[in-house]
Image: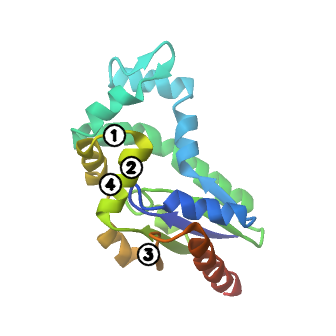
């Protein structure tokens, strides 16, 4: 199995690239979906409430409350990630082992690929990239957040400039869906041919 990472800063178009790949018939591991699963795990919710008093109400994590805490305090963000990422590490290791002998390409859709060192699991990394102001507008419209909230979230991620130095290929996502699909098909033909 070959694992290809698709990453990019918030609003960069990473999820759009992953959807194109999925629509082309490839398997895509969506790490955001894995994170959502973590937030429904009873043991995780107990630990979460113990670390962040008031973060769980009626058995459900209050993500808005958590966002206010962790995106204003890097130490608190690290505490939250210390709860979430061990679960995610187990997930990726389990999937890698389960599929290791199979001869096909699988994609990993993850925003914090480099920040969390998951690029070590990848055979190839694709970076979605677009101008900062476009990313900001996308996120503000999509997530209904303020400019300040976007900047707080963006500031905890590695810059796309630094990510470009680590990625194998950079795809500018400021184009039509059809053009992005053509770019991805051409790239996938290269990857499959290796």
Q: Secondary structure at mark 1?
A: loop
Q: Please name whichever residue, 154 or 107, is drawn nearer the observer in this view of the structure.
A: 154
Q: Residue 68 lies in what quarter of the image?
A: top left
For residue 192, side relative to residue 152 (left or right): right
Please tell me how crowded label 1 is: few (under 14), some (14-19), or many (20+) other residues with Cα within 10 Å: few
Whether label 2 touches label 3, CB < 8 Å: no
What percent of the width, then of the height, locates residue 181? 62, 72
Q: Which residue is mark 4?
A: 136
Please tell me how crowded label 3 is: few (under 14), some (14-19), or many (20+) other residues with Cα within 10 Å: many
Dot 1 or dot 3, earlier in sequence: 1
**Distance CA(mark 4)–CA(mark 2):** 5 Å
Q: Which residue is mark 1?
A: 145
Whether label 1 touches label 2, CB < 8 Å: yes
Query: Which residue is at the far top?
Result: 58
Point 23% across, 40% down: residue: 75
Q: Please name whichever residue, 137 or 172, is drawn nearer the observer in this view of the structure.
A: 137
Dot 2 or dot 3, earlier in sequence: 2
What percent of the width, then of the height, locates residue 163? 36, 70
**Distance CA(mark 4)–CA(mark 3):** 22 Å
Q: Secondary structure at mark 4?
A: helix
Disc marking residue 167:
3
**Distance CA(mark 1)–CA(mark 3):** 29 Å
Dot 4 or dot 1, earlier in sequence: 4
For residue 110, side relative to residue 48 (left or right): right
Whether label 4 touches label 2, CB < 8 Å: yes
**Distance CA(mark 4)–CA(mark 1):** 10 Å
Disc marking residue 139:
2
Tag in front: 1 or 3: 1
């Amino acid at each position: 199995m070959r694992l290809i990472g698709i990453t990019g800063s918030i609003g960069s178009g990473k999820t759009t690239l992953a959807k194109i790949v999925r629509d082309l018939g490839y398997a895509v591991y969506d790490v955001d979906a894995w994170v959502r699963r973590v937030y429904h795990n009873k043991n995780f919710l107990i630990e979460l409430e113990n670390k962040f008093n008031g973060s769980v109400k009626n058995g459900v994590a209050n993500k808005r409350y958590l966002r206010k805490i962790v995106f204003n305090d890097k130490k608190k963000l690290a505490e939250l990630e210390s709860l979430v990422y061990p679960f995610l590490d187990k997930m990726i290791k389990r999937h890698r082992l389960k599929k290791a002998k199979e001869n096909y390409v699988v994609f990993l859709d993850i925003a914090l690929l480099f920040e969390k060192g998951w690029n070590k699991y990848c055979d190839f990394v694709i970076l979605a990239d677009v101008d900062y102001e476009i990313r900001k507008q996308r996120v503000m419209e999509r997530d209904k957040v303020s400019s300040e909230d976007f900047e707080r979230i963006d500031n905890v991620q590695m810059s796309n400039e630094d990510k470009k130095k680590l990625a194998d290929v950079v795809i500018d996502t400021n184009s039509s869906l059809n053009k992005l699909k053509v770019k991805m098909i051409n790239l996938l033909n290269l990857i499959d041919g290796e």
